[in-house]
Image: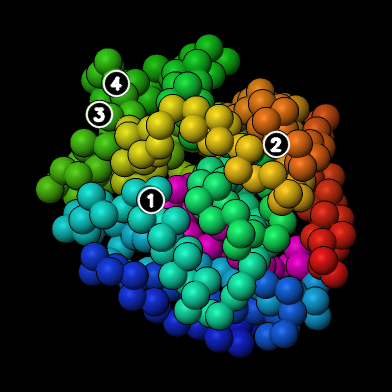
Amino acid sequence: MRPQTSPYATGLLDVGDGNRVHYEVHGNPDGKPALVVHGGPGSGSSPGSTRLFDPEKYRIVLFDQRGCGRSLPHASDPAADLSVNTTAHLVADMERLRAHLGVDRWLLYGGSWGSTLILAYAQAHPERVSEIVIPAVTTTRRSETAWLYEGVGRFFPEAHERFRAGVDHAEDPVGAYAARMNHPDRAVRERAAADWCAWEDAVLSMEGMGTPYTDRVDDTRLGFVRICSHYFAHGAFLEEGALIRDAHRLAGIPGVLIHGRLDMGGPLTTAWELSRAWPDAELRVVERAGHLGGGETRRLVVEALERFADG
């Protein structure tokens, strides 16, 4: 991992619908363009992700997706309109950002929800993508969401009972949480966000990374859970299975998929299916890693980015 860099350019890009997307650019202004696509959805960008890239070779772009990070308006405000926050809107925002920065083609890097958005963008604009590097592959199919919020509960029954109880054992818990995150009473939203984050942490609890989601429930977490539940309650606004079905559109784009065999939240199946449907992708399975990865995952990411740096 390289030292943390500081951005040489920042801005708020007006993407329409009353939204302004925050972005920053690091590294070499004349380097190979790379876009870091954060997870969540709704987590916001992390400046630490730039440490994976050689700043002498890459022009590294970070951005906060609609409603989170430093983008405006923030989803923690219940008045922020999520009807204009869908996968199609985010793909369009990425394309606006590319044009705004004068980038012809860029490498895409990101995992978890970020991989879903990367795949959606790349399938819509394959001519704008040079390479793709994904740690923790997801496509946010309804079947994947059902596993994360129902199926994996068989391994954490106590925590899952608490998660279900948080919405009175609703038949559709994800939809019920989405509804509560739009409640006018902040206390209701805070309780729902805390229960949601406690479940997220339970799923990750075997990875030894502490409690990344429930350390605090502030506006950042309120926005994160509101956006997460919004996307997951609507199948990421994608036709079920479309990103695997349409992976042929990625033909000619080199890809590296890195996935932990012990990923409880996003089982290896999705990465395997994508690698079978995308012949130009290389799947690297990390035997002892989970969803958050670790040293070996980072090593493989850096290796891929170094390989593509001169392409």
Q: Is residue 256 above or below residue 245?
A: below
* Left or right: where 304 falls relative to 195: right
Label 1: few (<14), some (14–19) or many (≥20) C-alpha neighbours in 10 Å: some
Q: Nearer the viewer, mark 1 or mark 3?
A: 1
Per the image, the residue denoted by label 1 is: 88
| Front position in the image: 287 or 189 | 287
- Give the mark, 4 or 1, whose residue is nearer the N terminus: 1
Q: Are marks 4 and 3 in contact (CB under 8 Å)?
A: yes
Residue 152 part of the magenta segment? no
Instruction: Give the percent coordinates (x, y) of residue 103.
Output: 59, 75
* Left or right: where 22 falls relative to 309: left
Q: Is residue 20 above or below residue 302?
A: below
Q: Is residue 45 visible?
A: yes
Q: CA distance from mark 1 to mark 3?
A: 24 Å
Residue 20, image quadrant: bottom left
Q: Which mark is residue 176?
A: 3
Instruction: Give the percent coordinates (x, y) of residue 19.
Output: 29, 68
| Front position in the image: 88 or 190 | 88
| Residue drawn 72% across the image and 28% down it | 276
Residue type (three-letter) at the residue carrying disc 4: Asp
Q: The residue tagged with tag 2: helix, strand or loop?
A: loop
Range of magenta residues: 34-53
Per the image, the residue denoted by label 2 is: 278
Q: Which mark is residue 172?
A: 4
- Give the mark, 1 or 3, whose residue is nearer the N terminus: 1
- Give the mark, 3 or 2, whose residue is nearer the N terminus: 3
Residue 40 part of the magenta segment? yes
| Residue drawn 53% across the image and 63% down it | 45
